[in-house]
Image (cartoon, rainbow, N blue to C red):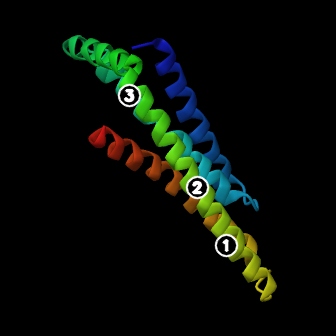
Amino acid sequence: MKKSMLYTGIAYVLAGIACFALAILFEWKIESLLWGLGGAGTGPGVMMLWKYFHWTKPENREEYEKRLQKERIELRDERKIMLRDKSGRIACIIMLLIYCLLIMAFGICASLGWFMPLARYAISGLGILLVIQYLSGIAAFRYLSKRL
């Protein structure tokens, strides 16, 4: 395990704690954003530190080397590369259709006079889009790996 993983984990945790401290000490309009950034920094940072300390233990090094070797093979496997490409294309097409449907839905909302809460709906919709895009890529990859 690289030392950079340790340093990155420490930096994430410190940045998260700093955001938490700012959110606690001051009352700003962006306080909710600071709470979110604190969690987004602390959570992954703690996981990076845990992984670093777990995989650098002498009893886990052999298993870690096996995992690295398997990962190298998986990354260079031509079939997996093709499947990743196809699943990415399918996810992109699905997202294009969903974007078109959302544009129509937001247009209808705006024409009916529901313009004021539109920003809230747009943010929720785009967050849902992000999740759908990620999950559709995974689902397409799994479907293609079983089929091909």
Image position, residue 27 (x, y; %): 73, 60
From the viewer's side, name the closer residue of 112 and 115.
Answer: 112
Crowd tier of the residue under label 1, counting other residues whose Cα lies within 10 Å: few below 14, some 14–19, many 20 or above: some
Amino acid type, label 1: Tyr
Label 1 sits on residue: 121
Label 3 sits on residue: 80
Above or below, comparing residue 28 to residue 109 in the picture: above
Is mark 3 in CB contact (under 8 Å) with mark 1? no
**Which quadrant holds residue 56?**
top left
Crowd tier of the residue under label 2, counting other residues whose Cα lies within 10 Å: few below 14, some 14–19, many 20 or above: some
* One can see residue 15 in this view: yes
Query: Quarter of the image containing the C terminus?
Result: top left
**Which quadrant holds residue 114?**
bottom right
Q: CA distance from mark 1 to mark 2?
A: 18 Å
User: Mark 2 falls on what kind of element?
Assistant: helix
Image position, residue 73 (x, y; %): 33, 16
User: Mark 1 falls on what kind of element?
Assistant: helix
Is mark 1 in CB contact (under 8 Å) with mark 2? no
- Choose the circle earlier in sequence order: 3 or 1: 3
* One can see residue 116 in this view: no
Q: CA distance from mark 3 to mark 1?
A: 37 Å
Label 2 sits on residue: 95
